[in-house]
């Protein structure tokens, strides 16, 4: 296997995680009646955190090491931010509308992450990241803006959506900091989601939960928890172990493209011409970021092989 192929592995892991993330909206739409956005979001993170804790030893991690991360500053921050993201995201799309709330959250995440990574991790933004992220954000604007549903006018929703993007960015930077310090990515993901699940457990218990007792509701909850959280964040962590935090969040912008595709194919939604152009732009930006990240990863591997590892 060549160094270029090895370096492409983390890129593919992040894209696979983004694909799983992109099924979240469709899974919720196919779920039973009686659910609430906050209830579904809290159930997802609680089940996902327990799933990560259950599979941790099988992927080489340590439950004791994961839970010990709660005593570190970045471990506590990453866990709290997983909870903050869920609450602010669902609150943002409720007040600002699904289209605008999603665009602001997903579009602002890479920008916040790039700036925080520069300030806290000394990961200087590359010109390729700036170009790829800009192309993706323009594509997202066309993709989401072409949707049939009009966004609301509540400014509080936009602030919450920005808070969700910032929360996701802080979580990513915190997780990257722990991984750079030598902690296993699987331990880091597990610590963050178990803590986030504990924080949101009271919120879950305060929501209507009768839907969980139905077969459709149970399947939806297990998919959201085990597939879009447990499996997705194991893959996300594998990518974050080898790639800078900024490019990782740019690659995750594949999520809305997957969500749109499923909406058209599975839910029968329509997409305007501008939407298809936007999807193509996002894919172009992702391809650029993926190629550059894989190439840079290959250069890092070659430097390490020669005994001159590059700073992380």
Image (cartoon, rainbow, N blue to C red):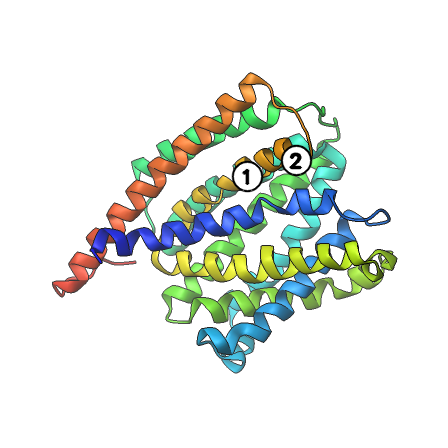
Position of the N terminus, as image quadrant, is: bottom left
Near-viewer residue (279 or 172): 279
Residue 280 occupies quadrant = top left
Residue 69 visible to the viewer: no
Q: Position of residue 86 (x, y in %)?
A: 67, 52
Q: What residue is rendered at 49% in x and 67% in y?
A: 188
Residue of label 2:
101
Q: Position of residue 57 (x, y in %)?
A: 50, 78
Q: Please report contact status of discs 2 and 1: CB closer than 8 Å, yes or no.
A: no
Q: Is residue 183 left or right of residue 162?
A: left
Furthest toward the bottom, the residue is 64
Q: Is residue 295 left or right of residue 129?
A: left
Q: Position of residue 199 (x, y in %)?
A: 70, 65
Residue 223 visible to the viewer: yes
Q: What residue is rendered at 72% in x and 46% in y?
A: 28
Which secondary structure, mark 2? Answer: helix
Position of the C terminus, as image quadrant, is: bottom left
Residue of label 1:
258
Q: Is residue 237 above or below residue 34?
A: below
């Amino acid at each position: 296997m060549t160094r270029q192929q090895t370096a492409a592995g983390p890129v593919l892991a992040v894209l696979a995680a983004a694909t799983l993330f992109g099924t979240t909206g469709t899974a919720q739409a196919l779920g039973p009646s009686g659910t609430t956005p906050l209830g579904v979001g809290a159930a997802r993170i609680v089940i996902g955190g327990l799933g990560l804790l259950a599979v941790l030893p099988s992927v080489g991690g340590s439950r004791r090491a994961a839970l010990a991360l709660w005593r570190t500053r970045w471990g506590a921050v990453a866990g709290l931010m997983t909870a903050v993201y869920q609450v602010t995201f669902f609150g943002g799309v409720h007040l600002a509308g699904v289209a605008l709330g999603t665009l602001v959250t997903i579009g602002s995440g890479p920008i916040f992450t790039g700036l925080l990574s520069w300030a806290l991790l000394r990961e200087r933004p590359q010109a390729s990241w700036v170009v790829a992220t800009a192309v993706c954000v323009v594509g997202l604007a066309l993709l989401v803006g072409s949707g049939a549903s009009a966004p609301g006018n509540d400014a509080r929703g936009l602030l919450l959506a920005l808070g969700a993007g910032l929360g996701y960015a802080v979580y990513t930077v915190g997780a990257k900091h722990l991984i750079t310090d030598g902690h296993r990515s699987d331990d880091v993901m597990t610590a963050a989601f178990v803590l986030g699940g504990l924080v949101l457990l009271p919120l879950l218990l305060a929501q209507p939960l009768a839907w969980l007792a139905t077969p459709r509701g149970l399947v939806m909850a297990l998919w959201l928890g085990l597939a879009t959280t447990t499996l997705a964040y194991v893959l996300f962590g594998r990518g974050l172990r080898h790639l800078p935090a900024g490019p990782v969040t740019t690659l995750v912008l594949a999520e809305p493209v997957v969500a749109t595709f499923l909406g058209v194919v599975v839910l029968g939604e329509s997409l305007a011409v501008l939407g298809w152009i936007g999807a193509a732009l996002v894919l172009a930006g992702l391809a650029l970021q993926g190629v550059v990240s894989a190439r840079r990863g290959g250069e890092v591997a070659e430097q390490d092989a020669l005994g001159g590892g590059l700073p992380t």
